[in-house]
Amino acid sequence: METFVNEHSIVRNIWGKADTILFIFAGSAAEFALNKAVDWLYFTGHLPADPLGRLFSTVAYARQIIFADNDSALKAIDQITAIHKGVEQSRGAQIPDWAYRDVLFMLIDYSIRSFELLERKMTLVEKAEVFEVFNKVGQRMRLKGLPGGYLEWEQMRAEHLQQDLISSDFTIDLYKQYRKHLGPVRYLLLKQVQLMVTPAKVKQMLSIGRIAYFLPLLYGYRLIRSIKLERPFRDALLPEKYKAQIIALDN
């Protein structure tokens, strides 16, 4: 059976480990809060009511596509498109293509950044493979203005970071919600991971601190991860509400 993503792809390696996905989640949570189109996520009320669940659903959809057969993946992408079209109709406006591209660009960038933090440096070929997978999702969604290759994506990603981010009342509120839903200890951990995984522009615009005090802990975690003893430490930090879902992400 034909798969949407090659079974031996680096993308499956990245998205087959729960802790890597959590790093992707943390980076996306930071950038979602700054995106100029975040008001679309507030329109339905789902994001402020359950920010972790809303962001987790985005990540879960991406993972579902990556590990699906081709037909199932295309159906999932079409479902995502239909959901957004429904929101557009309810609001009487259209989500701009750049906002869709921003989400795809985030998933590409944080896939690479998270893997490199937890595993090793990636080759240019591997990075291009990550780009191709998510670009294929964008093509299925019929998005306009997609980059033609990885190097063009790098340039567009840099431009998007300069043009599409703004610190607003939504940013402040979303971080209040993160703290409320995570509690003080996990919230501190979230901000520390964000300091390690986000681009410089994102760090500059957020009040998440300046020094990644947890970087030595990351190196220790990588060590115990290399001998496959990381799960008890990771699982102890997970929010109870999402623990079973997150553990199930390990492939």
Image (spheres, rainbow, N blue to C red):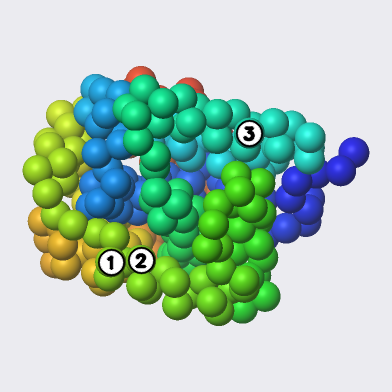
Secondary element at tag 3: helix
Rendered image: mark on residue 14: none
How many marks the image carries: the answer is 3
Decide which of 237, 130 is in the foreground and name it: 130
Image quarter of the N terminus: top right
Rendered image: mark on residue 160: 2
Q: Label 2 to label 1, Cα distance in Å?
A: 5 Å
First in sequence, mark 3 or 2: give its number: 3
Question: Residue type at mark 2?
Answer: His
Name the outermost residue toward the front.
Answer: 92
- In the image, taking residue 182 as reference, residue 54 lies left or right, namely right
Decide which of 162, 218 is in the foreground and name it: 162
Q: Residues within 10 Å of mark 3 (few under 14, many from 20)?
A: some
Question: Residue type at mark 1?
Answer: Gln
Location of mark 1 (residue) = 163
- In the image, taking residue 84 as reference, residue 241 lies left or right, namely left
User: Does residue 169 sit above or below 34 in this rendering?
Assistant: above
User: Does residue 8 sit above or below 95 in this rendering?
Assistant: below
- In the image, taking residue 37 as reference, residue 9 lies left or right, namely right
Location of mark 3 (residue) = 78
Q: Residue at 15% of width from left, 62% of height from top?
A: 205
Q: Are marks 2 and 1 in contact (CB under 8 Å)?
A: yes
Indicate the position of residue 211 as horizontal and vertical percent values.
Answer: 16, 67
Secondary element at tag 1: helix
Q: Residue at 14% of width from left, 54% of height from top?
A: 167
Q: Label 3 to label 2, Cα distance in Å?
A: 25 Å
Q: Residue at 31% of width from left, 34% of height from top?
A: 41
Q: Residues within 10 Å of mark 2 (few under 14, many from 20)?
A: some
Indicate the position of residue 49 as horizontal and vertical percent values.
Answer: 24, 22
